[in-house]
Image: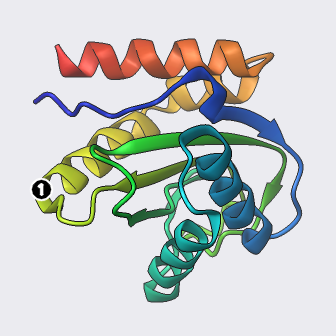
Amino acid sequence: MDVNIHMVPEAVAIDRVETKSQVLTKISECFSKVYGLDKSEVLDGLEQREALGSTGFGRGVAIPHCRDAGVRRPTLVMLKLDQPVDFGSADAVPVSIVFGLVSPENAGATHLHALAAISRFARDEEMVQALVAAPDAEAMFALLTNQFLRDAA
């Protein structure tokens, strides 16, 4: 399955935040800065989705996501947190890795395929630990692109 997730090196960052709300704000700021999306619209979409239930995936990973007219294909940002943050995950493990996903408004199956690809990555304990151990954003981007390219093949 070809997922075709759009991601650029500038969309990967290491940051320090203290709350879930701050995580969502940082993700929205990254979508705005890197991809030119409206920060308020993305934040509103992420918060609306989060109100339905935590996007804390488990094992220290969260995948906040929403849809927006400003993208043509699933678009990703990734944030590694200096200190884990409580995200309300079902397993109660604080989150250290956050994948933010914004898909086109009418991208039903495409959005689900992108979420599935990210969740497969998040279930790979070795890959998650490699992200946590990565020394900088460049190394994290390399891990992500190598994994997604391999899965798309």
Residue located beneath label 1 in the image: 109
Residue drawn at (79%, 35%) of the image: 14
Asked if residue 62 lies left or right of residue 124, the reply is right
Residue 28 drawn at (x, y percent): 64, 59
Residue drawn at (41%, 43%) of the image: 75
> Given the image, on which type of amino acid does mark 1 rest?
Ala
Q: Where does the C terminus fall, quadrant-wise?
A: top left
Question: 10 Å neighbourhood of mark 1: few (<14), some, or many (≥20)?
Answer: few
Residue drawn at (31%, 51%) of the image: 115
Give the answer, above or below, for where 103 lies relative to 153: below
Image coloring type: rainbow
Q: Where does the N terminus fall, quadrant-wise?
A: top left
Residue drawn at (17%, 65%) of the image: 106
Name the one closer to the observer, 104 or 147.
104
Name the one closer to the observer, 23 or 122.
23
How many numbered callouts? 1
For the question of whether residue 94 can be seen, the reply is yes
Give the answer, above or below, for where 129 lies relative to 20: above
Name the one closer to the observer, 39 or 7.
39
Asked if residue 78 lies left or right of residue 123, the reply is right
Give the answer, above or below, for where 147 lies relative to 30: above
Residue 60 drawn at (x, y percent): 63, 51
Give the answer, above or below, for where 57 lies relative to 135: below
Residue 76 drawn at (x, y percent): 47, 41
Tell me the element at label 1: helix
Asked if residue 104 lies left or right of residue 108, the reply is right
For the question of whether residue 97 can be seen, the reply is no
